Amino acid sequence: MADRELCGAPHHDTAATIRIIVPWPPRELFPNARVHHMTLHRARKPYRAGAKLLAEEALRNHDLPGGEDTWPGKDRIPITVTVFPPHNRHDDDNRYAATKAARDGIADGLGVNDRRFKVEFRTGGILRGGAVVVDVAVGPSGSLVERVEDVGGCQTAIPDWMR
């Protein structure tokens, strides 16, 4: 699957979004792996930190401050999480649960509490190596949209491994 196929329109109805593409979660983050809690921690910590860095890069690419300046108030922030699995061995529940560390890291990078996320999960096609594509709505009811140009396209942070 080409990079361009990951760059389709976001699934929520907003004027602007930030697209963040993170790698497929490590095996240890899937609930059915049933690993020791320290093994889980050693897998979760770098995955979350990587997602945070990608979210911070996406904010810089769109010249957005993040936090309360971009998402003021207590309104829910619509996000769409689309998983592109490397194979069909996991069911949807496991795939979505395995992305929790990435969603936490993205919330850290955006400067918001992840409990504000209103998450919509989707499953894309099989992609060699897998990927998780997260589209985050910018501003409540389209505020700050005038500061963002063409964020629905593929101009967001795409890591080197995806190019």
Image (spheres, rainbow, N blue to C red):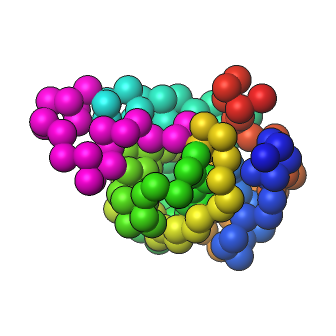
| In magenta stretch: residue 92 | no
Q: Is residue 93 visible?
A: yes
Going by the picture, which residue comes out furthest to the top? 160
Q: On the picture, is 10 further left or further right than 135?
A: right
Q: Quadrant of residue 36?
A: top left
Q: Is residue 105 visible?
A: no
At x 43% / y 57%, what residue is drawn? Answer: 90
Q: Position of residue 97 (x, y in %)?
A: 36, 57
| In magenta stretch: residue 37 | yes
Q: On the picture, is 86 further left or further right than 36?
A: right
Q: Quadrant of residue 160?
A: top right
Q: Quadrant of residue 2?
A: top right
Magenta-colored span:
21-42
At x 53% / y 71%, what residue is drawn? Answer: 120
Q: On the picture, is 132 further left or further right than 28?
A: right
At x 26% / y 46%, what residue is drawn? Answer: 33
Q: Position of residue 137 (x, y in %)?
A: 63, 62
Numbered disc total: 0
At x 30% / y 38%, what residue is drawn? Answer: 28
Q: Quick one: 65 or 78, which is closer to the camera?
A: 78
**Where 162 sits versus 11, above or below?**
above
Q: Quick one: 137 or 154, which is closer to the camera?
A: 154
Q: Position of residue 6 (x, y in %)?
A: 75, 51
**Where 10 sits versus 66, above or below?**
below
Q: Position of residue 107 (x, y in %)?
A: 44, 47
Q: Quick one: 63 or 100, which is closer to the camera?
A: 100
Q: Quick one: 85 or 11, which is closer to the camera?
A: 85
